[in-house]
Structures are given as structure tokens and as C-alpha cells.
Image (spheres, rainbow, N blue to C red):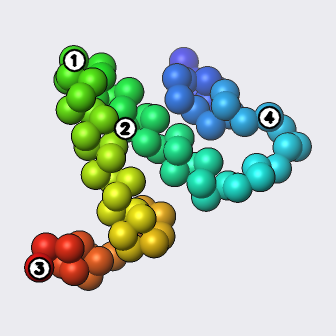
């Protein structure tokens, strides 16, 4: 059986061909957080736990003023002090 890209969560299931994203980085970050939350909820974690973790990621992103794909280990060390 071949792979046709139609597995749950595949980008082609969420994006329309030929339509540019208005704020791609923000939209990708939001989609990442949604996927992160869904993975945790699938493990039957409490919604409050999931929301707390999501808020931690959002707070760190705001603190370092950049998206996760730009994070470096040095940014984490600044918070740990």
C-alpha cells in the first residue's frame, strides 16, 4: 500500500492549493499547539494539564519573542537562571 499523503494531520488536508497564508508563522505555530494539545488529550491527560503546558509554551515564545523553530539552547538557559 502506497503513501498518498492523506493521513490524519497531513498539511494537504488543511491547506487549499493556490491560497497563500496571511500570517504563515503565526498560523503554523497555532497548528503546532493544536497538534500538541490533541496528542496529550489522546493520552487522556486532563484538559487543565494540557492548557497549562500550552500556556507555558506560549509564555516562553512571548518571552524570547520568536517562534519555536528559531529557539536555541541559549534561550532556555536564560530562563533557567
Residue at horizontal 36 percent and vertical 70 percent from the top: 63
- Gap between marks 3 and 2 measured at Cα: 27 Å
Image quadrant in which you'd find residue 45: top left
Q: Circle 1 — which element?
A: loop
The image shows a total of numbered marks equal to 4
Sequence-first disc among 4 and 3: 4
Question: Of discs 3 and 2, which sits in the foreground?
Answer: 3
Question: Gap between marks 2 and 4, in whole Å?
Answer: 22 Å
Distance from disc 3 to disc 1, alpha carbons, whole Å, reads 33 Å
- 1 or 4: mark nearer the eye: 1
Residue at label 1?
A: 44
Which callout, 2 or 4, points at the residue further toward the start of the chain?
Answer: 4
Residue at image mark 4: 16
Mark pair 1, 4: CA separation: 32 Å
Marks 1/2: CA distance?
Answer: 13 Å
The numbered mark, 1 or 2, whose residue comes first in the sequence reads 2
Q: x%, y% of residue 10?
A: 58, 32
Q: Which mark sits nearer the N-terminus, 3 or 2?
A: 2
Q: Which mark is residue 36?
A: 2
Q: In terms of image quadrants, where is residue 17?
A: top right
Q: Mark 3 near mark 1, Cβ–Cβ under 8 Å?
A: no
Mark linked to residue 81:
3
Q: Which mark is residue 55?
A: none
Residue 68: image location, x then y, percent:
42, 62
The reply to whether callout 4 and callout 3 are in contact (CB within 8 Å) is no
Amino acid at each position: 500500500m502506497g503513501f498518498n499523503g492523506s493521513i490524519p494531520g497531513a498539511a494537504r488536508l488543511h491547506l487549499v492549493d493556490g491560497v497563500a497564508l496571511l500570517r504563515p508563522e503565526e498560523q503554523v505555530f497555532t497548528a503546532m499547539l493544536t497538534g500538541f494539545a490533541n496528542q496529550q488529550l489522546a493520552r487522556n491527560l486532563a484538559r487543565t494539564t494540557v492548557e497549562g503546558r500550552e500556556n507555558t509554551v506560549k509564555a516562553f515564545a512571548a518571552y524570547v519573542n520568536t517562534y519555536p523553530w528559531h529557539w536555541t539552547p541559549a534561550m532556555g538557559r536564560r530562563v533557567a537562571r
